[in-house]
Image (spheres, rainbow, N blue to C red):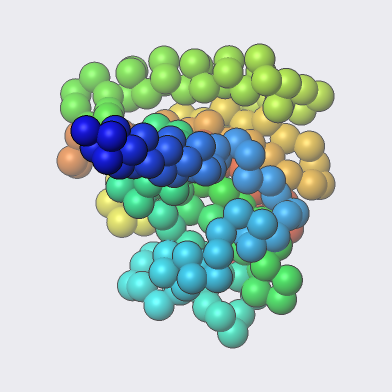
Amino acid sequence: MKKLIFYFLISLFFITKVSADQIAVVNIKLGTKLTDYFTTAQISKYNINDAQTDTPWYSYDGKYSWIMIDKKENIYKDDYDFIQIMYANKNDEINSVSSVTDYQFDHSEGLNECIKYRSQKISQYKQKKILKGLKEYSNEFKSETGGEMKADAIYFDSPPKYYFGFTCAYYPERDDTDFRLSYTTYEFEEWKKY
């Protein structure tokens, strides 16, 4: 019986330790090194430079690389379905972080629910004073890349350094709505336009 209790306590310790070591997305800071948060083995495992994507300009030889981590990997503790991090190859400096809730709003009322969810996220970030001193503005836009997409976004920025974006993207052809929280340096955003 003592052995059983001992093994139970040891397994409980390791389960608690894993949960405590998970990263909160909000704690990943722009301008810090990717290696401050992930091991080189993790960076290699989650790197998608070679994947077929709509953004083929990420590469080890170019200016930026891209990693994507799915929620099922149990590395971060937030409720996002996946996170994407873009970083400079020359110094591993993080230039963009995107967190995506992909499946929760995939139904006919999804866009309205996403907008409510976005308001809650903005409120949380304001309470934590993360958006303090940043200018707020909203934007609606359409895109035809990969099918029709309508986006309703609220941004907070501090030009010429960085911005936060809280976006609800709606794809009417497949009744699919995604929430995206992103924070990005202006330098990276300008590079991405070309």
Q: Which quadrant would residue 39 be assigned to in this image?
A: bottom right
| Residue that appears at 52% across and 22% down | 121
Q: Is residue 82 left or right of residue 35?
A: left
| Residue that appears at 62% across and 23% down | 125
Q: Note whether 53 is above or below 140 in the view shown.
A: below
Q: Note whether 173 is above or below 145 in the view shown.
A: above
Q: Is residue 21 left or right of residue 12?
A: right
| Residue that appears at 68% across and 46% down | 29
Q: Quadrant of the N terminus?
A: top left
Q: Note whether 56 is above or below 109 in the view shown.
A: below
Q: Which quadrant would residue 172 be assigned to in this image?
A: top left
Q: Which quadrant would residue 14 be assigned to in this image?
A: top left
Name the spot of residue 17 as percent of width and height, x first. 47, 41
Name the spot of residue 181 as percent of width and height, x first. 51, 37
Question: In this view, which residue lies farthest toward the bottom?
Answer: 61
Name the spot of residue 87 as percent of width and height, x first. 62, 63
Q: Quadrant of the C terminus?
A: bottom right
* Residue 98 makes an appearance in the image: yes
Q: In front: 33, or 49? A: 33
Name the spot of residue 150 as percent of width and height, x first. 38, 37
